[in-house]
Image: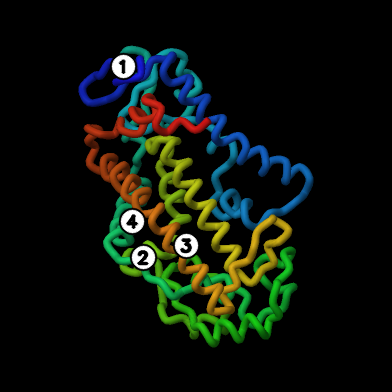
Amino acid sequence: MTDGLTASMTGTALRLTVEQWHPLAEAHHRRVDPVIEDRLQRRARGEKNAVEDFLFEYYPYSTGKLRTWHPGYGVTLEGDVQAYLGNPAYVRTDDGGATASLMWLNPPRQARLDMAIRILEGTASRPAATGCFALHEWAMTYRLRQDAVRHAHLPLRLSPEAIAATVEEVGLRCTHLDAFRFFTDDAIPLNAYRPTRATQQENEQPGCLHASMDLYKYAFWFSPLISSDLVMDCFDVAARAREIDMRASPYDVSPFGLEPIRVETADGRRAYAIEQKALTDVTEPMRRRLIAALTRMQSGEPDRAHADADDAARGRHVHE
């Protein structure tokens, strides 16, 4: 290792001394704290933010769990590790350290791991589909009154008639089950696809905003065996995807300081395509990083499981 840091290796597992991993944990806190403080302050004031709160409400991961730093599978922590040993995924090593163990992958978690890898690999194997223009949010409000829509507290920027006209003119081409399942009954027959849980691994594709957001879900499913650096990188991608999602929606996002992407117009659809392409370019390497980490866990071979912790120790993922 470089930059004045040293670590001893036992077999193929990286070991971090307390002098090494404490700064990494503190750097993680500096990265996460502004995000969770905003969330906690809104809750204390009774305020809602349909853009930012989504990542804490749809994906049910607490702020406390997000703040806790984990080095990931294949890394042993030395020093005062008692707090980690309170986590059921951690075991004490023979020399008094703590490491996240594959024994935590009981049969249900193993089945979930296999499924996540299949979906992610299937998504990565396909070209990005364009032409959906994020109309899934429109389909969720199709032919509904303001008081009946999913985010009823958030005003629509268009009338129900204008929303319906856009859906019918542009068409629906949603490939993501967990968006499609919220379509109104009238919108379902208008979609070009019929995604189901059984066909999810055949349907998902990398141009989908929800597929980008789900990287955070899959990473957190397997925390603490997935490093907190990778979890937060996936969180950042999800937050960017959610912002694009809501900017392209029929809701009024101006209270959140956001400009709408007016996909009801040709210019707006071109603007959305640019945002979609930029997000896909960022998401693709993130998806491959996550696939690699999950595949190492699946195989039980930590030969490169220390990669994220090693990079962090070198300062590559330390966010000030």
Tell me the kind of residue under disc 2.
Gln
Nearer the observer: mark 1 or 4; the answer is 1
Residue at 57% from the left image edge and 57% from the top image edge? 243
Is the residue 59 above or below the residue 210 in the image?
Answer: above
Q: Which residue lies at the image location 46% right of the left edge and 30% below the top edge?
A: 318
Q: Are marks 1 and 4 in contact (CB under 8 Å)?
A: no
Q: Which image quadrant is residue 98 in?
A: top left
Mark 2 near mark 3, Cβ–Cβ under 8 Å? no
Tag 4–tag 3 contact (CB < 8 Å): no
Report how far apart the C-alphas of labels 1 and 2 lie in the structure: 40 Å
- C-alpha gap between disc 1 and disc 3: 39 Å
Which structural element holds mark 4?
helix
Q: Residues within 10 Å of mark 4 (few under 14, many from 20)?
A: many
**Label 3 residue SS:** helix
Q: Position of residue 304 (x, y in %)?
A: 25, 34
Which comes before the other along the chain, label 1 or label 3? 1
Is residue 70 visible in the rendered image? The answer is: yes
List the residue tagged with mark 1: 7
**To which quarter of the image does residue 292 belong?**
top left
Which dot marks residue 120? 4
Q: Of the two numbered discs 4 and 3 on the same chain, state the one appearing first in sequence.
A: 4
Amino acid at dot 1: Ala
Disc 1/disc 4 C-alpha distance (Å): 33 Å
Asked whether disc 2 touches disc 4, contact meaning CB atoms under 8 Å apart, the reply is: no
User: Neighbour class for label 3 at 10 Å: few (<14), some, many (≥20)?
Assistant: many
Identify residue type, mark 3: Leu
* Label drawn at residue 205: 2
Q: Earlier in the sequence, mark 2 or mark 4?
A: 4
- Whole-percent x and y of residue 266? 53, 79
Residue 157 as seen in the image, left or right of residue 89 = right
